[in-house]
Image: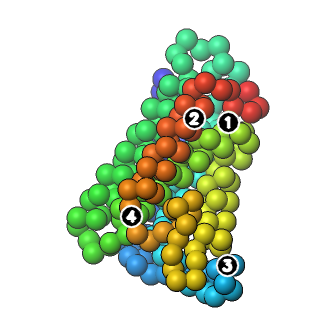
Amino acid sequence: MRLWLKARRPRLCGAAILVSLAVLIVVSESTVPMPRLVDSAEAGLPIALMTPLLVVVSMAFSLTGGMRHAEAVSVRPVWALELLWVTVIVVVGLAGCVLISGWSNTSLAPEAARNLIGFTGLMLTGRVVVGSRAAGVVPVGYFVVASLLGRGSRDEVAHWAWAADGHLDSTDLTICLGLLILGAGLRHTLRELGD
């Protein structure tokens, strides 16, 4: 069990969570200019919405560790251990967002928590669809497309572009939780590419 955990790079994931939370505190509501392809205007996209990508990409990388041939014949169900590992990382990240939301003046911490849930679901789905080595690219690609195409001329954001929305609502949260459940269910029922 220790070897399995060591192969999942817990220090990397812990550092990614800490750096992501520190960036969330430091940047608070700072924005980065991002074009909108819908109307060729430029609008600011909050940096806080991007910080969960660091955690999810490091989580995707950590899940590529291990000895796949030995784990394929192991007694313990590796998919359950991996799902537990992902759950621990997400819960720690969400707890950090809750603490930051109550402790500092960062008003985008709930939106960052929503993005962590949704990006994790996209990454887990990507492990099944594109393979474990490219799974971290799926949430990053989605975020770029949502940022460029999902925001309208009056700063309105389409529901499918929840990651670029600076406001938290129940529909976006439902979509993110659905993606997380879909990703976990696909990982349990289907084998990932490359196995």
Q: CA distance from mark 2 to mark 1?
A: 20 Å
Dot 2 or dot 4, earlier in sequence: 2
Residue reaching furthest left? 103
Give whichever of discs 2 and 1 has the lower sequence position: 2
Q: Is residue 156 above or below residue 87?
A: below
Of residues 126 and 79, the one drawn nearer to the viewer in this rendering: 126
Q: Give the distance between the C-alpha atoms of the residues marked 4 and 3, in whole angstroms.
A: 22 Å
Q: Earlier in the sequence, mark 2 or mark 3?
A: 2
Residue 37 at x, y = what percent? 69, 78
Q: Position of residue 128 (x, y in %)?
A: 67, 36
Question: Which residue position is annotated with label 3?
Answer: 38
Q: CA distance from mark 2 to mark 4?
A: 36 Å
Vertical comparison of 119 with 163: above or below: above
Q: Amino acid at mark 4?
A: Leu
Q: In the rendered structure, are the residues bearing label 2 and label 3 in contact, judged by CB atoms less than 8 Å apart?
A: no
Q: Neighbour class for label 1 at 10 Å: few (<14), some, many (≥20)?
A: many
Mark seen at residue 128: 1
Q: Would you name the residue on which mark 4 appears?
A: 168
Count neighbours of disc 2 (C-alpha within 10 A) and say few if under 14, some if 14 to 19, many if 20 or more.
some
